[in-house]
Image (cartoon, rainbow, N blue to C red):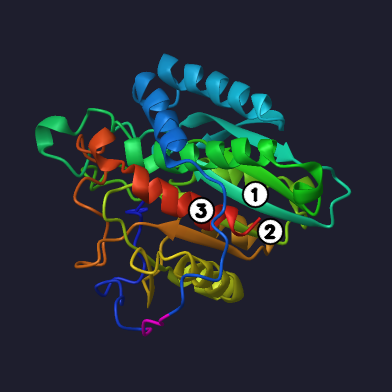
Amino acid sequence: MRARYYILLALAALAMLGCGGKTTHTTTEMARPAFSGDSAYSYVVKQLDFGARVPGTEAHDSCVQWLTAQLERFGAEVEVQEGVMLDYAGEKQRVRNIVARIGEDSLAKRILLCAHFDSRPWCDEDEEAAWYQPVPAANDGAGGVAVLLEVARQISLMTNDKRRTTGVDIVLFDCEDMGTPSFLKEIDRQDTWCLGSQLWARDASLRGRYEWGILLDMIGAPGATFFREYYSEQMASPYVQKVWKSAAELGYEHIFRNEQAGAIIDDHYYVGQALNLPIIDIIHLDEHTGTFPRWWHTQQDDIQQIDRATLQAVGEVVMSQL
């Protein structure tokens, strides 16, 4: 994920905490949406069983096949968008985005839900001995994908009357984490992160299809905290407010903090800019430092960084928007 280092653009200490006050909401008004954190957790485990899903590896190929089959099993129309993008070294990188369409084309309202499924090839935030090892990517990748798989499963269980008013597209982006390794100081090419979303957003046929969208990134950790990311506020402020209000009504305001964070170049940035789409990024930032967690881009991004309760919270909040 990023730096894109996530590339935190609003340095400062993310100019973060304190730009917005907390708001107290009651937690008894909203019916609790159907979602299973246990099921989502099992989807994380399955992805990890393939190994690190680094583009160009057998583990990546196997995961693409499994994700496609799962989404089809849940009733989605699925296609794999293939293309080529230039990586940080200027080399051609094969990209495979998984696009799942749920609901009829005639539906007036469509929502975009997305996450990335690839693993970073380098643990460049780890000790030097681990730099050339791939990230297990339990949280930075698999967690968001797992929540969206469970969302697709829950939608498949709904009656037609309940789901007929909102169409949902789930897009699992590839090559999000192929950005320049931090230990290569002499290389500084722009836009080397989020290759899958950049490719996807360039398809003119996709423009104008969605009312709004949500990106999930690093959303499964124990004690995770999600702040209102800067670009999300700029592109989709009413939807940020809507989502954070729903989270508070569900009793998750200790996770969805009503405070503004800095700017993060993530998949939502490229999609929002290219499609002029209101889209928000739900992403974990450390509540003390305003930066990414200590396990980010290290060998420690393993199953220990996934908590069923956090998956449950995020899943319920997403389901409450459909």
Label 2 element class: helix
Q: Using the rendered view, name the quadrant where residue 3 is placed.
A: bottom left
Pointer 3 residue: 316
Identify which amino acid the numbered label 3 is placed on.
Answer: Glu
| Residue at left offset 28%, top offset 29% | 134
Q: Could you tell me if residue 211 is visible in this image?
A: yes
Identify which amino acid the numbered label 2 is placed on.
Answer: Leu
Q: Label 1 near label 2: C-beta < 8 Å? A: yes
Identify which amino acid the numbered label 1 is placed on.
Answer: Ala
Q: What span is colored magenta in the figure?
A: 20-24
In the orientation shown, which residue stands out farthest toward the right?
A: 106
Pointer 2 residue: 275
Image spot of residue 238 (x, y percent): 60, 76
The mark found on residue 242 in the picture is: none
Q: 169 above or below 71?
A: below
Q: 318 above or below 141?
A: below
Pointer 1 residue: 201
Indicate which disc, 3 or 2, sits on the residue closer to the N terminus: 2
Image spot of residue 235 (x, y percent): 58, 71
Image spot of residue 123 (x, y percent): 23, 36
How far, Cα to Cα, is label 1 from label 3? Answer: 27 Å
How far, Cα to Cα, is label 3 from label 2? Answer: 27 Å
